């Protein structure tokens, strides 16, 4: 990222390289964040299915009422 002269001393900064490096780091972090969020959504979907199944089982069976008058 630093340009050096013939003696090996730093004399300027390669700013165009900074942008590329920062973008690469941002993309890596973004990918990790998205992967984490996807895992969380899958876990929550499984929990929702489990709770939905429990709610379905806890519903009372329908009853037939005869009207004998």
Image: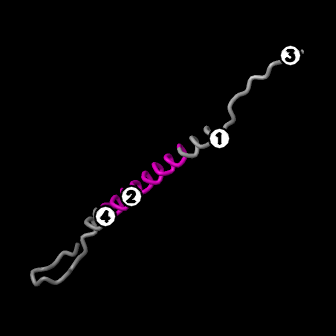
Disc nearer the start of the sequence (3/1) = 1
Disc nearer the start of the sequence (4/1) = 4
Residue under label 1: 58
Is the residue marked by circle 1 packed among few (<14), some (14-19), or many (20+) residues within 10 Å? few
Query: Residue 36 in the image: x percent, y percent?
Result: 42, 57
Q: Nearer the viewer, mark 3 or mark 2?
A: 3
Query: Residue 61 in the image: x percent, y percent?
Result: 68, 31
* CA distance separating discs 3 and 4: 84 Å
Disc nearer the start of the sequence (4/2) = 4
| In front of the other: 23 or 30 | 30
Q: Please tell me which residue is depicted at 56% across the width and 41% down the height of the picture.
A: 53
Residue under label 4: 19
Q: Nearer the viewer, mark 3 or mark 1?
A: 3
Query: Mark on residue 68?
Result: 3
Residue under label 2: 30
Q: Please tell me which residue is depicted at 34% across the width and 58% down the height of the picture.
A: 27
| In front of the other: 34 or 13 | 34
| Numbered disc 1: secondary structure | helix
Disc nearer the start of the sequence (3/4) = 4
* CA distance separating discs 4 and 2: 16 Å
* CA distance separating discs 1 and 2: 42 Å
Marks 3 and 4 close (CB-CB < 8 Å): no
């Amino acid at each position: 990222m630093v340009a050096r002269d013939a003696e090996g001393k730093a004399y300027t900064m390669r700013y165009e390289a900074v942008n590329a490096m920062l973008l690469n780091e941002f993309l890596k972090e973004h990918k990790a964040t998205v992967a984490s969020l996807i895992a969380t959504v899958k876990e929550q979907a499984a929990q929702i299915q489990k709770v939905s199944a429990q709610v379905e089982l806890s519903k009372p069976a329908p009853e037939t009422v005869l009207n004998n008058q």
